Image (cartoon, grey):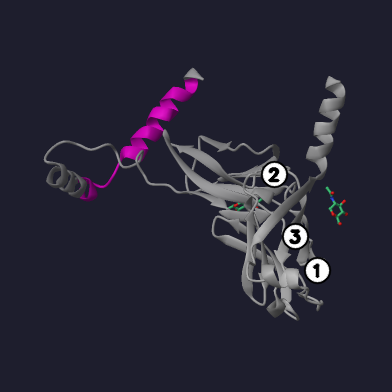
């Protein structure tokens, strides 16, 4: 190692050598620009960028993905990743590192990549969103009992259920809307919404539809059911008296979350 020192010094000298003309010009601009104080050498404060690709990615819950973090730094001292998501494999090249993230279940999470270059650390951020458009939105044929219709809508295999809004429309007009934000399940869910509607004579022949909205931080995913027709029925004097008040009297949300429900059952069994 000691025998390499003279060579090292020689290399240093060679690197600092510049033709006198350019050297003088450099001194000139330095004194002009900074009033005599010499700034940090430009070699160590050279700007460099850090990029993460892709910057936005929407996946299905449980999927894995790769994020490539790259930099313009000629000799990066280190790459690191900050994420709450489980990590998988890593691949790397001279100025990039590719990270695999596994089993993405957080509906939205930021992943940060840090690169250190000549003692300075910079970062880039990617946002990962996990969602699943409902496999199906099905409105059952409306059932008339007495003077009330029962409307039942099934939304299957949807994620994240906490960002779901289920809406019922009659002839294009919203008759009921329910947000499921109180549900924080991390699994795919089946949702059944049951709504009771007071029948009015004008409802006859009207189409009813059910709509599932996922509202994900600007990304809106909409699925709708096939329309169902409110069927004819014979009016009794009693139902006529109620006909003017078309209000929601009864709403039931029924949520089935496979894995979560199973876990709760097992927990209760083990406690018993
Ligand atoms: C990562 O990005 C760098 C720079 O764009 C590229 O050269 C490299 O091939 C990428 N690696 C993978 C695994 O995609
Ligand atoms: C949700 O509904 C689908 C289709 O009806 C069914 O195959 C699946 O098992 C249900 N999942 C749960 C968690 O109940």
Tell me if I can see residue 160 in this picture. no
Left or right: 262 with respect to 222? Answer: right
Query: Which circle's residue, 1 or 3, is located before the other in the chain?
Result: 3
Query: Which residue is depicted at the point 75% across and 46% down?
Result: 62
Foreground label between 2 and 1: 1
> Does the magenta segment cover residue 12?
yes
Q: Is residue 7 or residue 152 the one in the foreground?
A: 152
Q: Which residues are magenta?
A: 3-23
Image quadrant of residue 9?
A: top left
Query: Which circle's residue, 3 or 2, is located before the other in the chain?
Result: 2
Foreground label between 3 and 2: 3
x and y percent of residue 93 in the render?
A: 62, 45
Tell me if I can see residue 11 in this picture. yes
From the image, give the main secondary structure of the stretch colored magenta. helix
Image quadrant of residue 83?
A: top right
Residue at numbered disc 1: 142
> Does the magenta segment cover residue 16?
yes
**Mark 2 surroundings: few (<14), some (14-19) or many (≥20) residues within 10 A:** many
Residue at numbered disc 3: 134
Calculate the distance from the C-alpha at mark 2 to the C-alpha at mark 1: 36 Å
Q: Is residue 48 or residue 185 the one in the foreground?
A: 185
Image quadrant of residue 131?
A: bottom right
x and y percent of residue 266 in the render?
A: 85, 29
- Judged from the image, the secondary structure of the residue bearing numbered disc 2 is loop
x and y percent of residue 137 in the render?
A: 77, 64
x and y percent of residue 41 in the render?
A: 29, 38
- Judged from the image, the secondary structure of the residue bearing numbered disc 3 is loop
Q: Which mark is residue 236?
A: none
Calculate the distance from the C-alpha at mark 1 to the C-alpha at mark 3: 21 Å
Residue at numbered disc 2: 105
Query: Which circle's residue, 2 or 1, is located before the other in the chain?
Result: 2
| Some atom of ligand 2 lies within 8 Å of the CB belonging to the residue at label 2 | no
């Amino acid at each position: 190692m000691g025998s390499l020192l003279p060579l090292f010094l020689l290399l240093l000298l060679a690197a600092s050598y510049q033709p006198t003309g350019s050297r003088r010009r450099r001194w000139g601009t330095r004194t002009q620009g900074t009033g005599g104080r010499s700034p940090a050498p430009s070699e160590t404060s050279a700007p460099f960028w850090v990029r993460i690709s892709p910057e936005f990615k929407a996946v299905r819950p449980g999927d894995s993905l790769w994020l490539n973090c790259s930099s313009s730094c000629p000799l990066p001292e280190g790459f690191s990743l900050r994420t709450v998501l489980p990590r998988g494999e890593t691949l790397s090249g001279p100025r990039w590192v590719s990270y695999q993230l596994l089993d993405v279940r957080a509906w939205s999470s930021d992943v940060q990549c840090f690169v250190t270059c000549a003692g300075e650390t910079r970062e880039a951020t990617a946002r990962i969103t996990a969602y699943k458009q409902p496999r199906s939105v099905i409105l059952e044929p409306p059932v008339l009992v007495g003077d009330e219709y029962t409307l039942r809508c099934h939304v299957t295999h949807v994620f994240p259920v906490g960002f779901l809004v289920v809406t019922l429309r009659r002839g294009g007009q919203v008759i009921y809307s329910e947000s499921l934000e109180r549900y924080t399940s991390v699994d795919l869910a089946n949702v059944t919404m049951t709504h009771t509607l007071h029948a009015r004579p004008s409802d006859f022949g009207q189409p009813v539809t059910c709509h599932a909205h996922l509202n994900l931080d600007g990304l809106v995913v909409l699925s709708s059911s096939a329309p169902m027709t409110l069927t004819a029925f014979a009016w009794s004097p009693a139902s006529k008296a109620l006909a003017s008040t078309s209000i929601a009297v009864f709403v039931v949300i029924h949520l089935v979350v496979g894995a979560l429900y199973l876990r709760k059952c097992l927990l209760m069994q083990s406690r018993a």
